[in-house]
Amino acid sequence: MNVPLVLPEFLDRAVGLYGDKTAVYCGDRMFTYRELNGRVNQLSCGLKGLGIQKGDRVAYLAPNSLEMLEGFYGIFQLGAVMVPLNIRLTPADYVFILNHSESKVLFVDQDLYHLIFPVKDQLETVEQIIVHYKEAETNEIDYDRWLAGFSSAPFTRADLDENDVCSLLYTSGTTGNPKGVMLTHRNNYLHALSAMHHLHVSDRDVYLHVLPMFHVNGWGSPFYYTANGSTHVCLRKATAESIFEAIVTHKVTVLHMAPAVLNSLLQYYEVHHPDIEQNVRVVIAGAAPPPAFVQRVEEELGWQFIQVYGMTESTPLSLVSEIRSQLGGLNREEKLRLKAKAGYPMIGCDVRVLKDNGEEIIHNGKEIGEITVRSHGVMLGYWKNPEETMKALRNGRLYTGDMATVDEHGYIDIVDRKKDIIISGGENISSIEVEGVLYEHPAVLEAAVIAVPHEKWGETPHAFVVLNESETVSEEEIIRFSREKLAHFKAVTGVTFVNELPKTASGKIQKVHLRNDYWEKLGKTGKFVN
């Protein structure tokens, strides 16, 4: 008899094998897996009392907290759909997402309630708002008081099917409205089995939630760390200081985050040198960092560095970059270069880099094509958006929009987003390659490179640079540095110094904003689009 691959099984396993073990630390509170399960049952009862049924959408606007974590499982028991909201959006964005998803209940953290209050009257389908950590006098329901009114006894679950949609995740929309990615129980379940293997997850792990849980379900971390009986540590506000404090206090062994956050940890460590006794591994996704960055993490922090690649539409992880056994004889520099790449396919993922004609590129580290994915994690489609679904899913594959090479070892290396490749004098330039060189300059904290118009070459690379504190450097010096490190046609022709770079909630730099700002300053009327 086939057993459906549904996510509540993960918490069932943890309760059965690790019931008395600490499941979650959140602030000064601590809960065992049995206690967490009781709260989940209370939440399911409460939602049922509000009329939530299978297929209904329930939204969360919350930081990484116990309440957010238990929300996944409480909603899933009803067969309802979790809609995690990016906490960095505007009230207008929430109006669109909540109405488009037709969410019936909204859970919101007290610290974020001010983003919802001005637009409450514009929410067409939300029937109830419930506030976590409620302090202010409002007409909304207080979560803790509400939850306490329901039984923690085992909840009679809805009839769940592995192909049911369990989460609806809205991708960042830089031009136009965001798209709702439909992920199923099967997507998340099989992704968890693959990810937990490649990320070496075990019941000895203590996982610190730094990556937002609203971001592709925290890369699935509420699922595979729970399934293994690992301990979760929730940080409602993640700063470099609070992250290190949690690592030391709770003996954290693993963290997921964007490169920008890891960069802030390196800066903090340089000054404070916190004493960390346990082995720590850090999982990074986003633009692949330069090898020198990987080296700093492993040598200064003493942490294991694991680069991964994925996108919301693939649940998300598809590639992982570690040193495979047959490559153990490579020298240190060669290993660092491999670790800084997007990596090779995870189990269950058929990842191919294709040319425009559909043929696979040569594995020579030079030919460029688009990353495509066929896997257990590929989304069902975009919610109420068949046109965009058809653009993304073609011939049984997900077309990612990421351009890459593949080396002789099978490691995929992203060279740019399809829209971000710079074509100068007929030559293709990877903005990521140029950025990697700029990061080697001791004064540079962050860098982003875009194409700008040029009378002779059509377009050339222009850098936006954030400097390290107390550092000063001239535009001419940065240009000269890039010319010394790169072929001249790849070197930057101009530099804009900024205090910070625009980023998405997951830490990705939003180059479309840099391009638009640049053109506006030139007095152009056109806008770049994503």
Image: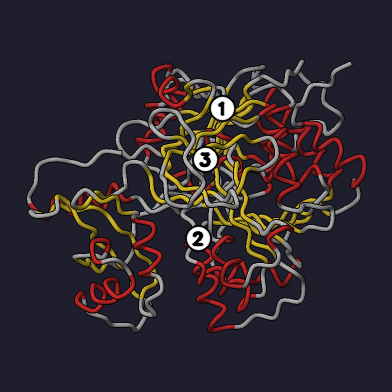
Q: What amino acid type is highlighted by mark number 1?
A: Met
Return the disc, 2 or 1, that comes first in the chain's sequence: 2
Crowding at dot 2, Cα within 10 Å, few <14 / some 14-19 / many 20+, comes out as many
Q: What amino acid type is highlighted by mark number 2?
A: Pro
Q: Which residue is depicted at the point 71% across and 49% down?
A: 198
**Element at label 2:** helix
Where residue 298 appears, as percent x and y from the top left, is: 63, 72
445 to the left or right of 150: left
* Residue 149 drawn above or below residue 298: above
* Residue 255 drawn above or below residue 313: below
Residue 212 visible, this orientation: yes
Q: Which residue is depicted at the point 62% across and 72% down?
A: 331
* Residue 467 drawn above or below residue 33: below
Q: CA distance from mark 1 to mark 3?
A: 10 Å
Q: Could you say which is closer to the camera, residue 282 or residue 128?
A: 282
**Residue topped by disc 1:** 379
Where residue 265 appears, as percent x and y from the top left, is: 55, 70
Q: CA distance from mark 2 to mark 1?
A: 25 Å
Q: What amino acid type is highlighted by mark number 3?
A: Met
Where residue 259 appears, as percent x and y from the top left, is: 50, 60
Crowding at dot 3, Cα within 10 Å, few <14 / some 14-19 / many 20+, comes out as some
**Residue topped by disc 2:** 259
Q: CA distance from mark 3 to mark 2?
A: 15 Å
Residue 235 visible, this orientation: no
